[in-house]
Image (spheres, helix red, strand yellow):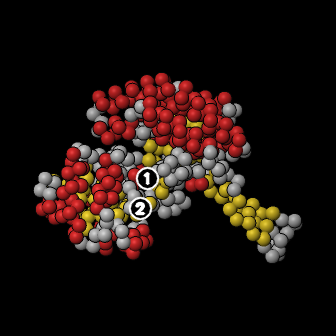
Amino acid sequence: MSVDTTSLQEAVVRVARDARASARELSRASTEQKNQALQAMAQHLRASREAILSANAQDVSAAKAEGLSPALIDRLTLTDTRLEEMVASVEAVVALPDPVGEVLKTWRRPNGLEIRKVRVPLGVIGIIYESRPNVTSDCASLCLKSGNAAILRGGAESFRSNQAIGEALRQALRESRLPEAAVSTMPTADRAGVDILLQLDQEIDVIIPRGGEALIRKIIETSRIPVIKHAKGVCHVYVDEAADLAMAQAIAVNAKCQRPATCNAMETLLVHERVAKAFLPTVIKQLQDAQVEVRGCDTTRAIVPTVHAAHEEDWVTEYLDLILSVKVVGSLDEAIEHIARYGSSHSDAIVTRDQAHADRFAREVDSAAVYVNASTRFTDGFQFGLGAEIGISTDRLHARGPMGLEELTTYKYVVIGNGQLRQ
């Protein structure tokens, strides 16, 4: 529904309060009830295929008319295949263990008190994201399984898509006799609604933003609610002097080209100077044949003159597009230092046959996911076996990397006594 300016505050507050009430009810739901609701969600997403794809086509058409970049339009676009992937992500969550109620640790004190550390839901989670409509169903399914109510606010460019997806999910909740406010989509695309939402610290327990650097910064500066940041992905692949160059080329091309608009796509390729002349001409040709614009340091350009010049800002840029920065480095130390200086603590990889180099890279690169001889594109909840993901946290507190069910819980202490009194 659309909301006029005068009723915006009331509408957003109502959504938050309804979510708070539903979170209390959802925390009591059994694993069987939640799984039945998830199965119903998958069924209703399939049954609503035409409505969802029609709404998405309207969003895509409007985005093209507004001149959004091809990368953003790709993230926005739903196809039959992507809709089936959404369904598969929801179904995958059904098979995952329910973390709620898990006893993490039990111990007994000398006075006879038994203390249990038990997983519990976070409560109400506000998720603010851009472009990708699949985030709506991914986040809804994970929040439901972990006993949390979700308030979902996608970008204005995907408003119609998210409303259609949200309605399918709420139909499933009604059918499953769980509170439909457990999955709420914001009733307006007005950005002022986000500002209101971020002040409701009595109703919402945590905010999880997913999007560009500007969105993350604005939310951190505005929110009165704790924020788990899912910041930009300036991801690196380092080709070591001891690398298998055929493997390195395959990994580099996959990390850049398989889906460049994602946060785990490689943005900078680092190459050791001892293998640069043998490696760069062939890998750059394959990248350029795949329509990648390559920007390189002076050494890279001396080896491959068709490469554009890289500037300082390129090393910190998340392109989310078919653009790549390339730098030749003199050592493993220089590669690690470059990542520490310019990276975003997201996903970084080394390609090497030297185990000592691999161990040093894995130990010293302080990123949420560090890879040895594999593409950075695997930083993903589904690929990690977590089912869908709520996002990829680059924070160090509470959660880091792909956030699955366990990362959507906290814990409390349950203390069992038989009349003990503190002296």
Residue 285 placement (x, y as % from top left): 20, 51
Circle 1 sits in a helix, a strand or a loop, which is it? helix
Q: Which residue is mark 1?
A: 378
108 w.r.t. 349: above or below: below
Residue at x 21%, y 55% (from the top left corner): 282
Residue at x 13%, y 53% (from the top left corner): 306
Asked if residue 1 lies left or right of residue 286, the reply is right
Amino acid under disc 2: Tyr
Residue 101 placement (x, y as % from top left): 70, 53
Residue 314 appears in which quarter of the rendering? Answer: bottom left
Callout 1: few (<14), some (14-19), or many (20+) C-alpha neighbours within 10 Å? some
Q: Are marks 2 and 1 in contact (CB under 8 Å)?
A: yes
Asked if residue 40 lies left or right of residue 85, the reply is right
Residue at x 62%, y 48% (from the top left corner): 96
Residue 63 placement (x, y as % from top left): 33, 32
315 w.r.t. 167: above or below: below
Mark 2 to mark 1 CA distance (whole Å):
9 Å
Q: Which residue is mark 2?
A: 371
Q: Is residue 202 visible?
A: no
Residue 269 appears in which quarter of the rendering? Answer: bottom left
Q: Quadrant of the C terminus?
A: bottom right
Residue at x 79%, y 67% (from the top left corner): 114
Callout 2: few (<14), some (14-19), or many (20+) C-alpha neighbours within 10 Å? many
Name the disc covering residue 152, or none: none
- What is the tally of numbered marks visible in this picture? 2
Residue 255 placement (x, y as % from top left): 34, 52
